[in-house]
Amino acid sequence: MCGIVGVVGHSPVNQMLYDSLLLLQHRGQDAAGIATGMGKTFNMYKGSGLVRDVFRTRNMRDLPGTMGIAQVRYPTAGSAGNAQEAQPFYVNAPFGITLAHNGNLTNCDQLKDEMYRIDRRHINTESDSEVLLNVLAHELMMSTAGYSLDPAAVFRAVAGLHKRVRGSYAVVSQIAGYGVLAFRDPFGIRPLVVGYAETDEGTDYLIASESVVLQGQGFQLIRDIAPGEAVFIDVDGNFYSQQCADNPSLNPCIFEYVYLARPDSLMDGVSVYAARLRMGEYLAERIRNEMRAGEIDVVMPIPDSSRPAAMQLAMKLNLEYREGFIKNRYVGRTFIMPGQAVRKKSVRQKLNPIGVEFKGKNVLIVDDSIVRGTTSNQIVQMARESGANKVYFASAAPPVRFPNVYGIDMPTRKELIAYGRSDEEIRDAIGADVLVYQSIEDMKSAVRDVRPGLTNFEASCFDGSYITGDVTPEYLDRIEYSRLHADEEAQSRSQLNLNLVSD
């Protein structure tokens, strides 16, 4: 999961790109980068860390131009803190292209091989985004046949890319001297929206992972970019779009609605906040059927993404709602931290219980999902230590039993607490008195209730069905093997850094 932005304007866009990245910081905390275009020249700066830590005034001054792209990066296994893989990426031929990507290519190894053997292109990092950039560059070269670029050639190139690339990808790219290109994979797994703002100089266009960026920058939403569609905005502000995929279909990642997206975003016609409220309503019915009336004294969310579901659940069951945990917002996400001991310590640093809300009560704790179970176990322990009589736990999402291969860095199968375990075994592992999960169908219905026409979802981490059709058990074995070795390497590097500091 990453956050991407593209802008074509009539005045310098560096500040707008920076502010947009701040609005997308929840989508990536490992690295940030901005690339702007001025005439046929690119200016780029990127680095590891939060947006506010990467960019200084001097960096922003070095990013002139009226068009640009930007990204906040969420790392995959073993690549956290690797500045080489910060985006955007750049190639100088043909034309000069920068690119930023949200998603994951499932045929990356095959494409790398094609790059070396057939396309004669060199890949310098382990990032699939660099592979994607080189595929786009090659297809642009083939579509122009050495002549100048026009929108028709751009769309032919994207069509060629769709035929070669598998997996999930929402992309923003800029072509030196020509404009900004954005496109989405034929299954529409990762989100992408486009909006406009009228200025005295003309119409500005903004493309982003979430609609909250458009709202924050004063832009009007035009629409979601459709699965397989490409949008090209030239340097003069002319807007072009075309469907570039054969048989596209909309299958948005349902984990966006469960957890990833900001609640104030509108995604593929669905209010994320409204979807989470509905998840709370469905979960309330499940609890009503599985627990006796009067067993629960108070409902508490794990801040922040589970709050709408917990509030709605409490209202539906006519139960008291309380904020029992205070979140420290300056601690990184636990499930991307190397080492189980570090994760456990981080949970205690990240959440602090308000003891008076727990003492002598039967508490129902609501979370958006349970992945490893590390956080859930620690939260149950904290509730008991704070004096809770009984601790019940409810998840607004079903059990996460399978790895996600479409851009969410989830653990290997063996690290998932629900893998190979029954609900009762999971309850015992996290230490709760009762554990209630949302059903897969109720989770999907919660989103469909907000937009009835939305029928299909990418929900592989819950149901094991991989929409692209190319994810085999052997593929999962390979990525898990790579992840284990990458994690070991990352921990070794971390230990080496600690030793150097102590020396």
Image: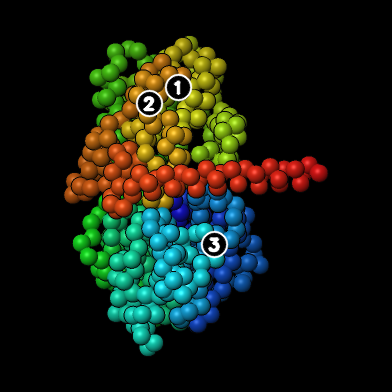
Amino acid, disc 2: Arg
Of the residues under marks 3 and 1, which one precedes in the sequence? 3
Contact (Cβ within 8 Å) of mark 2 with mark 1? yes
Relative horizontal placement of residue 52, taking residue 118 as reference (left or right):
right
Quarter of the image where one finds residue 8: bottom left
Q: Is residue 2 above or below residue 115?
A: above
Of the residues under marks 3 and 2, which one precedes in the sequence? 3
Q: Work out whether residue 155 or residue 10 is closer to the camera in this orientation and state it.
A: 155
Q: x and y percent of residue 243 in the render?
A: 25, 68
Q: x and y percent of residue 207 in the render?
A: 39, 64
Disc 3, SS: loop
Spatial separation of the CA atoms under disc 3 and disc 1: 39 Å
Relative horizontal placement of residue 384, taking residue 257 as reference (left or right):
right
Query: Is residue 239 shown to the viewer in this render?
Result: no
Contact (Cβ within 8 Å) of mark 3 with mark 1? no
Amino acid, disc 1: Ala
Disc 2, SS: loop
Q: x and y percent of residue 150 in the render?
A: 34, 82
Q: Which residue is mark 1?
A: 429
Q: Which residue is mark 3?
A: 125
Q: Which residue is mark 2?
A: 421
Amino acid, disc 3: Thr
Q: Is residue 2 above or below residue 415?
A: below
